[in-house]
Image (tube, helix red, strand yellow):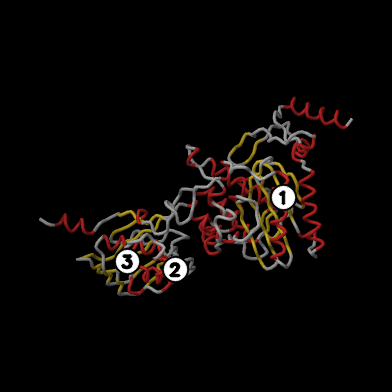
Amino acid sequence: MRTFLRVSVLAALICLGISRPAAAVFGFKRWQPIKSLSLGSVDIRPSWESAWVRERLAADPAAEAIVASYLAGLSSAGYERDQQGVWIASGPFPVAQYQGEVPRSAASLTKVATTLAALATWGPTSHFETLIGWQGQIENGVLIGDLIVEGGEDPLFVWEEAIALGNTLQQLGIRQVSGNLIVTSNFTMNFETSPAESGQLLKQAMNVSEWDYAVERSYLEMPTGTPQPSIAISGQVQVSPNSLKNQASGWLVSHQSLPLIAILKAMNIYSNNPMSEQVANTLGGPAAVMRKVTEASGIAANEISIVNGSGLGEENRISPRATVTMMQTIQTLLRASTDNPAQNFTVSDIFPIAGADGGTVQDRGLPQNAVVKTGTLAVVSALAGAFPTQNNGVVWFSLLNYGSGLDTLRSRQDQVLSALEKQWGRAAELPPELQTTVRIGVAPYQFGDSRRNQIIDNPADKTTSAQP
């Protein structure tokens, strides 16, 4: 009778148009469901595909047993079961979950929301622009007046970028500034929140005689033979609260940041809080981030609540299901980022890869080629991402744990994911959905690449053209 029922239900599903059912529950080999029509990042499924059908397609007793064992182990270790959340999915379907729709303290999984909002707003290949100009006049390599830096909200302007910028200015013949260095309030460097401090760091980086160990160390990471700028600025650092675009005598250089995909990758590898806060603020703040996330992904508003862009504080709460949905939406945006599929990105280009990228996933016992985002507070350990399997394709997951003893929680996270990988088999090769081309520090994603400094006006050219 049971066999007859399974066959009958399978036949009914085929009649409905589900040509490749993921039907482990029916006793057949698990296949992937038919590809749904996608509008942006939201799946538009056929009207006949009911919640009951989706649940039957997704059911996986083995995965449910592994998750149940994981939760039982947490309980036996003294963790409150009702304070944990789990969502394991194959494609759009959950194969196992526990309180998956309940928002929980997400810690740095909040950066997944910030990442999604940034991608949905700007796109992966966009840049932040910093303009360098002057007030006064330039004579014989001396700027008689002030050097102006019009910030562009670049959250990854670091020592190497400043050194390369100094070299470009020196190539334009500028050796000295008699006046001040004026920076606008949206210029930041080395993750400093203070524009005044950022200006001091820029002034230091552009004059080798003021370098200390920190600058020297960064310089040594640049290509051998990179020049050392020696632009002496006689005045002080001043901060302008307003744009100076209409007050400059002229503009010398347009500095283009690394593309957004690389900026977000660096932010997520090291879970950099100042970077994520700056990105979120540039987007309009936490409320704007939430609005952009729900619009892009279709996540219910009651499954996400954030008060900042970084995840600092337990007030940032996201459900396990919403976390997976955000990561899948990011994948959709990246895979359709250009008209040329060969140039498209994946989640592996924007989140750290276990065993390859270091940072917060260093020394974890995660499945091979897992791409993940971690989140950590004093009593919060969160982990979300995806990993490839032989029999179930790319598996998406979100584990939100609450309780003290973070090493224990991390270890148990690694164990449950490894058990799922063992159940479905380790992928023989990396699928296209998880391949990566973005490596921070490797061309074309190198810090201090002078090719991102575009000359606007060359004072030397003007001097030459003025001669009889």
Residue 195 is marked as 2
Q: Secondary structure at mark 2?
A: helix
Residue found farthest to the top: 15
Of residues 301 and 411, the one nearer the viewer is: 411
The nearer-to-camera label among 2 and 3 is: 3
Residue type at numbered disc 2 = Pro
Of residues 176 and 340, the one nearer the viewer is: 340
Task: In the rendered view, tell whether residue 47 sits above or below residue 142.
Answer: above
Q: Which corner quadrant of the image does residue 139 belong to?
A: bottom left
The quarter of the picture where the C terminus appears is: bottom left
Whole-angstrom CA distance, mark 3 to mark 1, is 51 Å
Task: In the rendered view, tell whether residue 326 sits above or below residue 111.
Answer: above
Point out the tag, 1 or 2, that comes first from the N-terminus. 1
Estimate how packed mark 1 is, as few (under 14), some (14 to 19) or many (20 or more) residues with alpha carbons within 10 Å: many
Task: In the rendered view, tell whether residue 26 sits above or below residue 125.
Answer: above
Whole-angstrom CA distance, mark 1 to mark 2, is 42 Å
Q: Is residue 24 left or right of residue 387?
A: right
Q: Which corner quadrant of the image does residue 15 belong to?
A: top right
Point out the tag, 3 or 1, that comes first from the N-terminus. 1
Confirm whether residue 247 shows in the render: no
Residue type at numbered disc 1 = Trp
Residue 87 is marked as 1
The percent coordinates of residue 363 (x first, y second) are 61, 61
Q: Which corner quadrant of the image does residue 130 belong to?
A: bottom left
Q: Is residue 8 left or right of residue 441?
A: right
The percent coordinates of residue 53 (x first, y second) are 76, 35
Residue 228 is marked as 3
The nearer-to-camera label among 1 and 2 is: 1
Whole-angstrom CA distance, mark 2 to mark 3, is 24 Å
Point out the tag, 2 or 3, that comes first from the N-terminus. 2
The percent coordinates of residue 319 (x first, y second) are 70, 53
Q: Secondary structure at mark 1?
A: strand
